[in-house]
Amino acid sequence: MNDKEIVRRLKSGDVSGLESLIDKYAAYVGTIIRRIVLPVLSESDAEELAADVFTAVWRSPKMLTAENLKPYLAAAARNKALGRLRSSRQWQPLEDELLSVSSDIESESDKRLLAEALANALEEMESSDREILVRTYYYCRTLKETAEELEITEGAAKTRLFRARSRLKKILTERGIVYED
C-alpha cells in the first residue's frame, strides 16, 4: 500500500491503515529509536517507543500527508527516544560546547528562541558544515557513520566536524548566545 492510501485510511479511522503503516515503517522507526536509546535503554524500551510513535500517529493523523509521512515518523521517533532518555535520568546530555547551554534557560519560549537562533545560524553556514552538524547531532550519527554517509575518511569527518562546530560557536557568540565550557 502506498503512503497516500495509508494516510487516507488513517484519517478515516480504518485500522488497516495503521497495520499497513506499521508493516511498511516499523523497521525504519525502530532503527532511528535504537540508534538513540540502545546504549542506555533496553531493546524492549526501544520496541515500546516504536509502539508509542505508531499510537501517536493513529490518535492524531489530521496533519499527515503522503509527502510528510516518512519525515513525520522520523521526527516523532527521534523526539520520543530523546524524551525517554531525558526522563530516564540515566542519560546526561552531550557535554559538548554547543549543547551545554546555560542552565538558566527554563521557559519554553526561551528554548524556542534558542532553537530559532541555532536554526538561523545553521542556515548561514556553508552546506557542508551544516550537513555534518545535522547528521552528527540531529540524527545522532556516530562519527564513523557520518564519514561513511559523506564518503570521507573518519579523520576528515572529525576535522570537518571540529571546524563546523567552531564556526557555529563563532556565529552564536557574535549574536550574544552564551554557552558554558
Image (cartoon, rainbow, N blue to C red):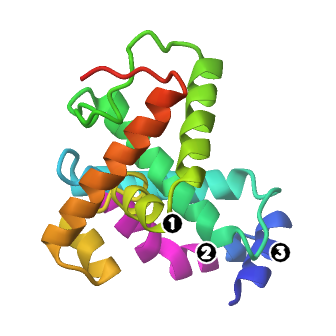
Residue assigned mark 1? 127
- Of tags 2 and 1, which is closer to the observer? 1
Quadrant of the rendered structure where residue 21 is?
bottom right
Q: Which residue type does callout 1 highlight?
A: Ser
Can you tell which mark lies on residue 42? none
Instruction: Check disc 3: other Cα within 10 Å, few if <14, some if 14-19, many if 20+.
Output: some
Q: In this view, does 35 lie to the left or right of 9?
A: left
Distance of label 3 from label 2 (alpha carbons): 11 Å
User: Residue 95: x percent and y percent?
Assistant: 22, 32
Instruction: Check disc 1: other Cα within 10 Å, few if <14, some if 14-19, many if 20+.
Output: few
Residue assigned mark 2? 21
Q: Nearer the viewer, residue 179 or 5?
A: 179
Quadrant of the rendered structure where residue 159 is?
bottom left
Q: Which of 100 and 82 is in front in this view?
A: 100
Residue assigned mark 3? 8
Point 44% across, 65% down: residue:
131
CB within 8 Å, label 2 to label 1: no
Tell which circle, 2 or 1, labels the residue nearer the N-terminal end: 2
User: Residue 88: x percent and y percent?
Assistant: 29, 31
